[in-house]
Amino acid sequence: MPENNQIDETKEEFIRLEHLKNIEEAGVNPYPSCTKRIDTLFQAKTKKEGEKVQTAGRLISKREMGRICFCHLKDESAKMQIVFSEKELGKDNFKFFIKNFDVGDFVEISGEIFITKKGEISILVKEYKILTKALLPLPDKFHGLQDEETKFRKRYLDILMNEEVKEIFIRKSHFWKATRDFLDQEGFIEVETPVLESTPGGADATPFVTHHNALDLDVYLRISMGELWQKRLMVAGFEKTFEIGRQFRNEGMSREHLQDYTQMEFYWAYADYTKGMELVERMYKYIAQETFGTLKFSIGEFKNIDLSKKWEQIDYASEINKQLGINIMTASEEELKAKLQELKIKYDKAENKGRLIDSLWKQCRKNISGPAFLINIPVEVSPLAKRKSDFRELTERFQPIIAGSELGNGYSELNDPLDQEKRFERQAEMREQGDEEAQMHDKDFVEALKHGMPPTCGFGFSERLFSFLENKPIRTCQIFPLMKPETTEEENLNYKI
């Protein structure tokens, strides 16, 4: 028996197949290719009583009352009551609808507007036509989809039955549109860079590997939004570029992390990180206002985040020292490991100083409400950022901190080819020592830098920013998150054997 009064889909499909057969035997195509819809349901609702209407949508309810049947029709614009009457349709047409049309079917109707005794604007159906015969039922409207995995696996039903879920993705569309609009207004041009790369670069991350058959070459799915390519465009003479697209990192999953997600990165010639921070602060405020209509948010345990205020700047080393009582600039690797052990933070014994420092910082950032910019980040954790002229161990890097997380990353780009080459060599050594997230040596990029790249500020953020402002896990904010294939009982049995 189905649990929680849920519909028995197997039995229901059998019944609907019979209805399909009846429709076909009546000489009606249950899946026509076009419709003569003139009005959306929203438009139909604006019409006056007695006016004619021709519309279409999905049946989402059906209630028979003798010679009358009350239904609700839904399209993207609205939901509306429609009424089938034996008097209007004739006995045979009325019975045909009652017997063979089910909740979930798409129908086209023509009729006229009338007001029911209860004052509800409705359509009295004069003619109807099947547009799509649904062979499986919709979830029970009182129970819906209960299981979290089922919601992700059958997201189309989750969206259909839950208007709040649908609204998330409408807002997400507005979020990326606002991002494009802001950068366009600031004079940036949108570009497209390769998704497949022979050398992945622009981030510390483990890439996905695939094979290019035509070139007989192993290639990588990009781990950044064309960082090293957009810098080549700065060499080429472009001054303001950005890209929004998908990038891929073969790493763990969490409330904040996915392997396949949307990222934005911009590059701005003749600008440094201070100009970048000013632009990013304005950009975040613009995006939040355009998307959510407010600059005040409650995110997780942080209840009063106000993006409208002036964003403070937090010194990396000073903040760690203040919270944890250790000076990362003078501490040895042994002292860093001892502090991690004291805090019961797991780490790999083979990790270098940069990774150890980063683990300490991640412990600290969760206590910062923001909005703020993290600055003065050490070279050890910033392989692509330019060194500060007054303190060579630090970089001109900045990260927006909101609700205990880094929601973006930017810096004055390193344009010294010799310094860049040394850092790539150091990263290559780290890879040889087992650090799979260390960056690969991109000789072609170093060669491009040798031709000269102007002072440049680069910055990027991912859809993590949207999920935080939405106050939901990032997986919930992906319209179709990646899922493991479902297995049958027989497959599970074979696996166990």
Image (tube, rainbow, N blue to C red):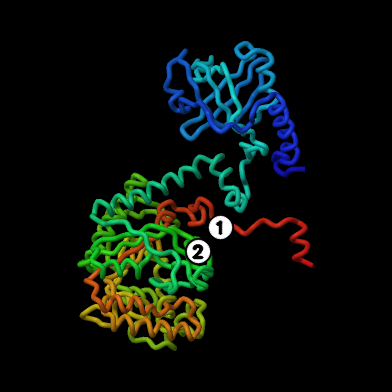
Residue 115 at what x, y percent from top left? 50, 16
Q: Find the distance from the CA under tag 1 to the CA under tag 2.
A: 9 Å
Question: According to the image, label 2 marks what residue?
Answer: 259
Mark closest to the chain's N terminus, 1 or 2:
2
Characterize the local packing of mark 1: few (<14), some (14-19) or many (20 or more) Cα atoms within 10 angstroms.
few
Determine the image quadrant of residue 440.
bottom left
Q: Which mark is residue 330?
A: none
Depth check: give the residue in front, 122 or 34: 34
Question: According to the image, label 1 marks what residue?
Answer: 482
Residue 37 at what x, y percent from top left? 49, 26
**Quadrant showing the N terminus:** top right
* Callout 2: SS: loop
* Callout 1: SS: loop
Q: Amino acid at mark 1?
A: Leu
Q: Amino acid at mark 2?
A: Gln
Q: Residue at x 25, y 69 (%)?
A: 456
Depth check: give the residue in front, 144 or 80: 80
Q: Residue at x 64, y 31 (%)?
A: 30
**Quadrant showing the C terminus:** bottom right
Q: Residue at x 38, y 50 (%)?
A: 175
**Residue 369 visible:** no
Number of numbered callouts drawn: 2
**Residue 296 visible:** yes
In the figure, 242 relative to 218: above or below? Answer: above
In the figure, 91 relative to 175: above or below? Answer: above
Q: Is residue 86 left or right of residue 300?
A: right
